Amino acid sequence: MKIIFVCGSLEPGKDGVGDYTRRLSSELIKKGVSVGILSFYDKGIENSLNEIQQDDRQNIECYRLSNQLNISKRTFLAKKWIDSKNPEWLSLQFVIYSFNNRGLPFGLGKHLRYVGSNRKWHVMFHETWLGLKKKDPIKYQLIGEMQKRIIKSLDFNLKFEAIHTHTKFYQRELRKLKFKPTYLPIFSNIPIRKKSITCVKSGNEIVQEYTFVVFGLIHPKTPIGMFAKEFSDYFKSKSNVQGRIILIGRSGNELKEWITELKIHNVSFSVLGEKSAEEISEIFQEASFGITTNPIFVVEKSGTVAAMREHNLPILVVSENIQPKDNFRIKFDSDLFEYKSGNFDNFMNRKFSKPQVSSLGEIASKFLSDLHI
């Protein structure tokens, strides 16, 4: 059995979907499946590139086509490479902005139909379209309508035989377009590395320190000022208890605001920047809690959240107060808690159970089963 994945970009560490695809590919290779990856709109190169990428010591054959090449050239080269590999399945790892900077890849379905000839197509919807939130501006709603048409055109041209998505919310929205998506949970992007846990000592007393880890991109419009004040007030009121926030990874433009608010409220924090997967795993194992800034209704799609959960970290959701249309509400697992004004004490006093998470191997097996492989 041979599968070729089709995604936007494959620059390691620079594209989340590319990293996801490479890690899934590695696991499938371990299960005896022949795998390759085609990046059809690669932002990390200037022309075309045949290369071997690695994940977990597995070699993965990749063919990268630059977004600087015109669509006809990319289509011709992609078809030639895929025909040479002769896969039974093509798997489209779909984020609409991965295939066009404006999020409007008109004609993508037609070009991929030519690339794939009469092969079987699968699609994973990592994201869908704009305009799904309450109070979205009219511009987003109009763009979203065009994006829905592009997605419908993809299905018309490629005739997907299997459809996946990571979130219950996207699953519901896709069903409105008459798709029949199956839920496939996201897997952790940080493998566990065993390490002994240490404690913090002050003089002759053991100080109980609670560390909160923020990993990856910080989303805009989080209530960081309010949260930082409650965080500070809580730990000031406790004796022999400390609280600290650790920020790791590429935090993005919002990091400056977080640093400003944490300093204003005298919150102890560290900005560690980018770290290796092994180092991040060690940090997770010494931490008490995770923090995510992903909007609550799509928290399931976050590989960083999956990583925290796999490391048994209860997670506090500190995100913008936005709601999806139609009052969709995610059913929370017992290890997730949504921060709102005044409830930080409740979070700290809550008893959390160990999260039930699927391993990469289990998710790869389900992927194959859903494709009837």
Image: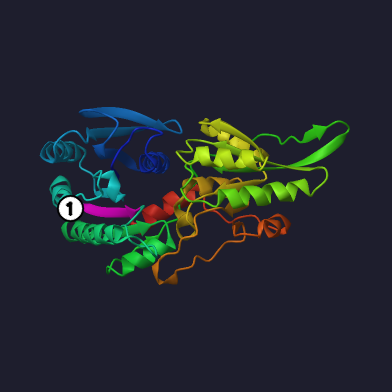
Q: Is residue 115 left or right of residue 17?
A: left
Q: Which residues are magenta?
A: 120-125
Residue 143 occupies quadrant: bottom left
Q: Main secondary structure of the magenta part?
A: strand
Considering depth in this image, is 54 or 31 the residue closer to the camera? 54
Check if residue 122 falls in the magenta segment.
Answer: yes
Residue 265, horizontal then vertical, whole percent: 66, 43
Name which residue lies at 22% across and 33% down: 66
Q: Is residue 50 left or right of residue 217?
A: left
Residue under label 1: 109
Q: Is residue 323 left or right of residue 91?
A: right
Quarter of the image containing the C terminus? bottom left
Residue 192, horizontal then vertical, whole percent: 57, 39
Q: How is the image coloured?
A: rainbow
**SS at circle 1:** helix
- From where the camera sits, is residue 336 visible? yes
Residue 185 occupies quadrant: bottom left
